[in-house]
Amino acid sequence: MSKLNYVTKVFASLAIAISINIGYSATSKHHIPDAIAAENTPVSVETKQLIERLTGQWQLAPSVSNTESLNFIFTADGKLYIVSTSQKSALALEYQVNTNNGQIYLDVLQGGFASRTILDFSQKGQLILQQLVIPAVFQYSSPFSGGFFLPNALFLNRISNDTSLPKDLEIIPLQSGVSSARQSEAKTYVGSMNRAQQAFFLEKNYFAGNLETLQVGIPSETANYKYQIIVLDSTKAVQNIAIAKSDGLKSYTGLVYLAKTPNDPEPYTTTILCESLTATRQSPPKFILKPLPDCPSGYEKIN
């Protein structure tokens, strides 16, 4: 499992649905953490005792669906590190313990993201995190396409009272996983536009000049991307584009073009999908049409 897949999987394992959604847009992404923080009254004796009980290192109990060795390190000052011992990397978060009507909640915060889980301890002293769901931002992310299913609860065993981090540990920012999930939307949409253009050309013998004509059900704009079509030659090639709207996201472009094989005079359509080498909000250059087109400058071919 790659470090990026590990990050996505771990954060998904912590996302909880108790009338809470995750804020994604620039205008709303801080509302949820602020709302959770606002619940915090002055720390009670009960909450202090819970934090003391939580402080230390906990290891995720093995299960059929989980083979990754993960340690959860809770510090007394509200920091949470989820450590992959095999990857020698950790996800850095913050946490709060809240109580409401006799129920204990563990609220996990990172930037504009927040999740809530019901916290409990078993008679044997296991830490139990309940009501786990996959957050919407990760539904199109590749780690879940392989059949990863979340359990109804996570069970963790205390392995140490020590809260110090292992040496030579790489701290991975959550944003890398979030960006990957958002970029999955763009890759999926541009790939769909490419395939739709192939079908459109097969029926019409020319390429669609806009999304409305293409009728693929993809909006011209989402929260994270703008989608465009540039006809390079109505009977030879069309370029499909996803331009990032936010900093930190890569942009994507696809080409559908007419090609021929040496042994078959009948032309056929084929496609290319390209990803920007770095995050960019600029429109990609146009493809240069030739027998074997390459990705535009600043872009690389992806599957």
Image (cartoon, rainbow, N blue to C red):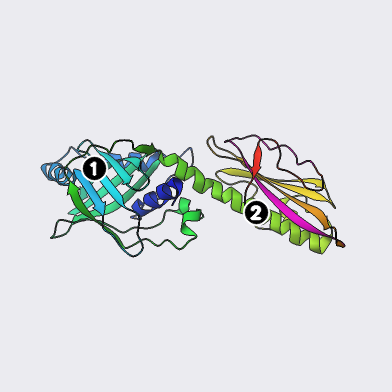
**Labels 1 and 2: the sequence-earlier one:** 1
Residue 84's disc number: none
Instruction: Give 227 or 154, whichever is nearer the viewer.
Output: 154
Q: Is residue 6 above or below residue 165?
A: below
Q: Residues within 10 Å of mark 2 (few under 14, many from 20)?
A: many
Q: Tell me if I can see residue 24 in this picture.
A: no
- State the SS at label 1: strand
Residue 268 x/y as whole percent = 81, 59
Residue 102 x/y as whole percent = 17, 54
Where are the magenta residues, as a range?
A: 265-288
Instruction: Give 275 or 264, whichever is nearer the viewer.
Output: 264
Q: Tell me if I can see residue 249 in this picture.
A: yes
Name the residue beneath numbered marker 2.
191
User: Residue at 50% of width from left, 43% of height from top?
Assistant: 179
Residue 232 x/y as whole percent = 81, 45
- State the SS at label 2: helix
Name the residue beneath numbered marker 1.
74
